[in-house]
Image (cartoon, rainbow, N blue to C red):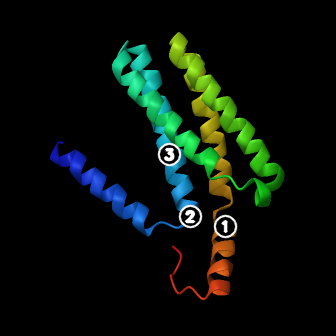
Amino acid sequence: MKPADQYRKVDIQAEVASADPHKLVDMLLVGAIAQVARARACTEHQDFQNKGIAVNAAVDIISTLFSSLDQDKGGDVAGNLAALYTYMLEALAIAHAESDTAKFSEVERLLRTVKEGWDGIREEALQVLAARSAESGEKKPLK
């Protein structure tokens, strides 16, 4: 591993260790967007090995987002996100199999839309996290 890659890995690990749950989901969304964009670019350049690596990384991240949904507490929002993540996973499979850059772009746009919505609820999410911390007696400050 190159020194710059090692530094990035350590930097990301430090950011994850200090992140609140809202920030962790934000980081996953950023990572998924980056991997789908990478898969699209690799397709355009006929770099099929790296396209596969990027698609697998995107699938792993979106699967993590899907599995983190709380269907009981999340109600319709969680159900809609579950359906959207399922669609994205299916679209990625098609985009990968058919080397369809338009399909990769569609998934990237959908992820960006989810991220914009997620960014929009940051303050409300931090208030909920602070209330939960206060109820549990936890002393960890939220960023």
Image coords of residue 63 (percent x, y): 57, 41
Q: Is residue 130 above or below residue 3?
A: below
Judged from the image, the secondary structure of the residue bearing numbered disc 1 is helix
- Residue positioned 35% across, 24% down in the render: 50
Pointers 2 and 3 in contact (C-beta within 8 Å): no
Image coords of residue 66 (percent x, y): 63, 45
* Label 1 or label 3, whichever comes before in sequence order: 3
Q: Which label was assigned to residue 21?
A: 2
Image coords of residue 36 (percent x, y): 50, 31
Sort mark 1 into few (<14), some (14-19) or many (20+) by Cα contacts within 10 Å.
some
Judged from the image, the secondary structure of the residue bearing numbered disc 3 is helix
Q: Is residue 115 visible?
A: no
Residue 97 horizontal side relative to residue 13, left or right: right
- Residue positioned 60% across, 40% down in the render: 112
Pointers 1 and 2 in contact (C-beta within 8 Å): yes
* Label 2 or label 3, whichever comes before in sequence order: 2
Q: Which label was assigned to residue 30?
A: 3
Check disc 1 and give the amino acid type: Ala
Q: Which label was assigned to residue 125?
A: 1
Residue 33 horizontal side relative to residue 18, left or right: right
What's the CA distance linking mark 2 and mark 3?
Answer: 14 Å
Residue 1 horizontal side relative to residue 54, left or right: left
Q: Which label was assigned to residue 114?
A: none
Judged from the image, the secondary structure of the residue bearing numbered disc 2 is helix
Residue 28 horizontal side relative to residue 77, left or right: left
Check disc 2 and give the amino acid type: Pro
Sort mark 3 into few (<14), some (14-19) or many (20+) by Cα contacts within 10 Å.
some
Check disc 3 and give the amino acid type: Val
